[in-house]
Amino acid sequence: MSLTPQFGSIIPSQKQQALDTNFLKFDEGDNDFAQQYLPEIYEQEVERYGNRTLSGFLRMVGAEMPMTSDQVIWSEQNRLHIAYDDVAANLGTASHLDLTTVNGTTVVNVISINDTIVIMDVVSGTEAKGIVTDVPTVNGGTLGNAAHIAVQLYTGSDVQSVFASSTTLKIFVYGSDYTKGTTIGTGAGNSATRVSVTPQFTQFSNSPVIIRSQYVISGSDMAQIGWVEVATEDGASGYLWYLKAESETRLRFEDYLEMSMVEGELNTNAGAGNYQASKLPGTQGLFAAIEDRGNVNVGFTAAAGLTQFDEILKNLDTQGAIEENMLFLQRQTALDFDDMLSQISTGAEGGTAFGLFENSAEMALNLGFSGFRRGSYDFYKTDWKYLNDASTRGAIDGVNSIEGVLVPAGTSTVYDQILGTNIRRPFLHVRYRASQGDDRRMKSWLTGSAGGAFTSTLDAMEVNFLSERCLVTQAANNFVLFKGI
């Protein structure tokens, strides 16, 4: 049987064979003849970027706790001993020291008569010890200037002859010295009133930010089925349809929850009660907290690694001296640390340490950490993917770039204003808004009129995500931020 081709018709064949009479031809016009063949389709999605998620840092070093307010406030201890920086030798009187700081701010004087002090010039290295012989009248002495104290050096010299007009002096009280049979009373001399030192605390606060995201798909697109076999970072695997995009939106939002806590900044343009985007208060993230209240190391390199790292240890000695610390580093800085560690021999000087992981090397390695000890400190080093990912800070390497962070392990003791007592908290922890009526740690819900949602006349399915949270960085003076030059 033969058919006369009309309007693009074809002549069928009795067998399943490729003939020029039974194939549609696309070689006329803009079409290509090869388009008649069905493509060879790989159903499985190729993971060309590996694990793309960035979250996990805060899970490793912190905790999450609910709160009910627009602000979280905590108090941190100040130093225990009496010390003053930027003290000046007073040109007016040979025995006087001026506690007024260089920038002109008068400090609170809590030094008493008969206190023994150490005086050090931090520039020249000159040092002397003496006893306080007079203090301001407000402290029971006779001096009219509230920022002055009179000191008799034990060498017999006066203050100005030893320290000239130096304004770079540091002094601290190391004890006191009284004659026999005296009492602490009123007036000058051995019966002078001692200043009662009232402990002061420093108060910090942070505010939560509302983080939101949404995925929308129309009802028509939901009816156009297309399957892709996937294995996503959150554990979902198998064949996904339009929910493939929903799954990635959720993963991206979960990353934003952590990235907001790390990168957050307070908004200096914030206006009271003004909720325009440019007026929102913002929140202080980890990097901002360390730059504001912590330590910043610039230009850590393998060449000067051990010497430079020891300087960091000396600075930690002046702070809380937390024994166990974690290092989260970008690739180059991690390599610099490896080169530095190659200079350290085992034994008293250095070596490996896994105390934080129940002294189990296997546990530490399974979590991606390698441990080492330097001085009296244990450090656990790991790569931080957030600093290596090309879609975030991994694309930046050089001037002012973030190259790593040192985070103290364990917990800190702070005064809780609500409980009215000292409590222990991880140095880093997240506070999220929650109450009996609403938990805003991680909310997701459906709206629209498709995909099982019947809440509006919108011909689409809307997948909504919301969280309200902030990061509490306690004792930031124990943190170190590594930056490039």
Image: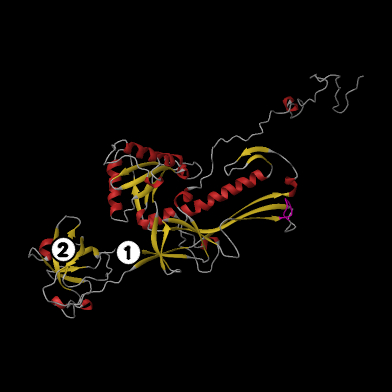
Give 132 or 333, whichever is nearer the viewer: 132
Which image quarter holds the C terminus?
A: top left
How far across and how far down the image is residue 440, in percent?
57, 60
Residue 177 placement, left or right of 32: left
Give 199 or 4, whichever is nearer the viewer: 199
Say what secondary structure mark 2 lies in.
loop
Taking the magenta stretch, the answer to whether it contains residue 115 is no
**Residue at the disc numbered 1:** 78
Residue at image location 63% in from the left, 38% down from the top: 230
- The answer to whether residue 78 is above or below residue 22 is below
Can you name the residue that lies furthest to the left here?
Answer: 156
Q: Amino acid at mark 2?
A: Ser
Q: Residues within 10 Å of mark 2 (few under 14, many from 20)?
A: some
Disc 1 vs disc 2: Cβ atoms closer than 8 Å?
no
How far across and how far down the image is residue 246, in percent?
64, 47
Query: From which residue to which does the magenta span run?
Result: 448-453
Label for residue 165?
2
Residue 47 occupies which quadrant of the picture?
Answer: top right
